[in-house]
Image (spheres, rainbow, N blue to C red):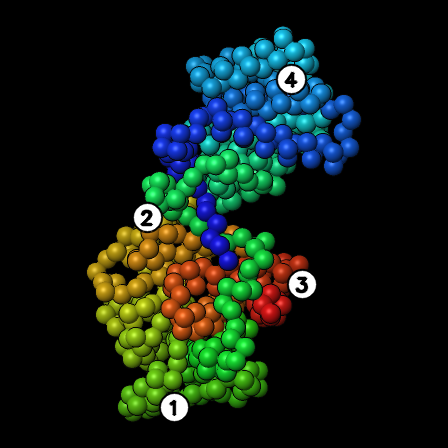
Amino acid sequence: MTDRKLATPEEMYAAENGTMNTLKIPQSVLMERAAFFAFEVLDDVLHEKDCTDPCILILCGSGNNGGDGLALGRILMTKGINVTCYLPDTGKRSAANLQQEEIFLQHVKEAGFTGSIVKDTLPDPDGFDGIVDAIFGIGLSRPVTGLWEEVLQKVNACKSPFKMAIDIPSGLDGGSGKILGSCFKADLTVTFGEVKLGQVIAEGPSVCKDLYVEDLGIVLNPSMGTEPLHYTFDEEDAAIQSFLPRDPAGNKGTFGKVLLFAGSKETAGACILAARAAFAAGCGMVQILTDPVNRDLILHEVPEAMVNTSVYEKALKGEDYTDDLHDLVSWCTVCACGCGIGCGAVAKEILSSLLKACRDIPTVVDADGLNLLSREDLLYDVLPRRVILTPHVGEATRLLGEKMPDLLKDGIFAREDKIRSFLNTGRFSGKEAVFLCKDHTSLVLSNLSGRIYVNLTGDDGMATAGSGDVLTGILAGILAQGCRKNMDLARLCAYGVFLHGLAGKNAALKMGSYGMRAGDEIDALSFLLP
């Protein structure tokens, strides 16, 4: 699988400038490529809708996005399509915009093509077969007001068969995904270079529907100094199943051994869900360290798993369990702890001893493990060298020492900055720490990498008891396989949350978002992987 880039407006501007100034590809060439790609998409839509003798309205702003619209209009009219470009006088215009207007008018005057540029009153949007938005582009950073606000309200309310945005729907922040006042509601968007981060997070998907991407020759890479910060995985990628290739000659040890410290007297379900999920993700063996009252139920529900209760039994009696813990840690490839363990004295004692024993074992800390960590700073001193923290936003506020409104008010950017600062504290000195912040849009960050993974898969039906336990099991199962191959820890975690979201989406399709349960996610996962 390849990591799909998600660019912010600032990153795209830097890439465009680098492409023009360093690679010497003129802006006019990029604009012509953009217009022609937009035409190809638009032409396909017109054929699909069986539009005969179509009339197209293009809304053109005063900048380069408006220039793209004028160039598209010129191409459309050379193909015999009736085009009207609405280009009101709203201020200073870019040189490329002025040039495209001149070329458009020359085609009308000298070649006799049918097309017009209207600068005063907006033509009635209901009189057109399609409307194209080329107003602002990705540079918008303030609320839409005045004339363009009125225009957007009118075109959004019209009954045109389709609405297409060039690069990004006008009114959408290309970085945060917030709607800035009014926003063009696009049925399809043609975007250039890379997908913009704001198109796929927050409010972006609600106004930026079918997305078509064309690179135009714009280069984003480290050698050009234009490497994006954000990445994701594409659920249409045919290589999903080959991310962790299986060894045909492998045995159960080959695919990794997962140690789960999970469950307490009344939360055996956490053990069962995490264990089943780890197996579904492909690991070879699972052993569960838990309260002895859970043994029979676990063996009944997950007979493939091994159950260890000796550590818990000795901890309850105040006896030494060092050797028992050493045997468990020596056996495992990966450890995952915290699901349903509670925050009592015994759970805290075992967690502290286990984390210390797992010094060289990649370890996932979730749920009550995180709650204990947020209460006991001394636990940071015994964290393993490779640790993955998987809080939901509520748990993240406790770890980061933040209030919920402050963590949510500026979208993912506020979270990124606060998580990055947290990972760069002395608590994680000499360690590889990954922070997976679970939310509608989950983030994966590492203190050893500048790259941020943004997860876009999932369904609201996953907001149900036990989903976090399933994710912990999936992560453990994937890490058990990937860490044996020295694969990047953050990327493995990003793949895990990506798979979990896909499984949840498929479970919702089968069971419905209202009625699906966490166990349905595990069943769906089994059909995602070969």
- The CA span between labels 3 and 1 is 39 Å
Mark 2 = which residue? 417
First-in-chain label (1 vs 2): 1
Q: Is residue 64 above or below residue 211?
A: above
Going by the numbered disc 1, the residue's amino acid type is Ser
Which percent across, then down, holds residue 73? 61, 21
Which percent across, then down, holds residue 516? 62, 64
Q: Nearer the viewer, mark 4 or mark 3?
A: 4
Q: Nearer the viewer, mark 1 or mark 2?
A: 2
SS class, disc 1: helix
Mark 4 = which residue? 84
Mark 1 = which residue? 310
- With 71 as the anchor, is 473 left or right in this view? left
- The CA span between labels 1 and 2 is 43 Å
Is mark 1 in CB contact (under 8 Å) with mark 2? no
Furthest-top residue in this view:
109
Which percent across, then down, holds residue 518? 57, 67
Residue 511 — which label?
Answer: 3
Q: Is residue 277 above or below residue 11?
A: below
Going by the numbered disc 2, the residue's amino acid type is Asp
First-in-chain label (3 vs 1): 1
- With 365 as the anchor, is 119 left or right in this view? right
SS class, disc 2: helix
- The CA span between labels 4 and 2 is 45 Å
Going by the numbered disc 3, the residue's amino acid type is Met
Q: Residue at x 43, y 63 (%)?
A: 493
Q: Nearer the viewer, mark 4 or mark 1?
A: 4
Is mark 4 in CB contact (under 8 Å) with mark 3? no
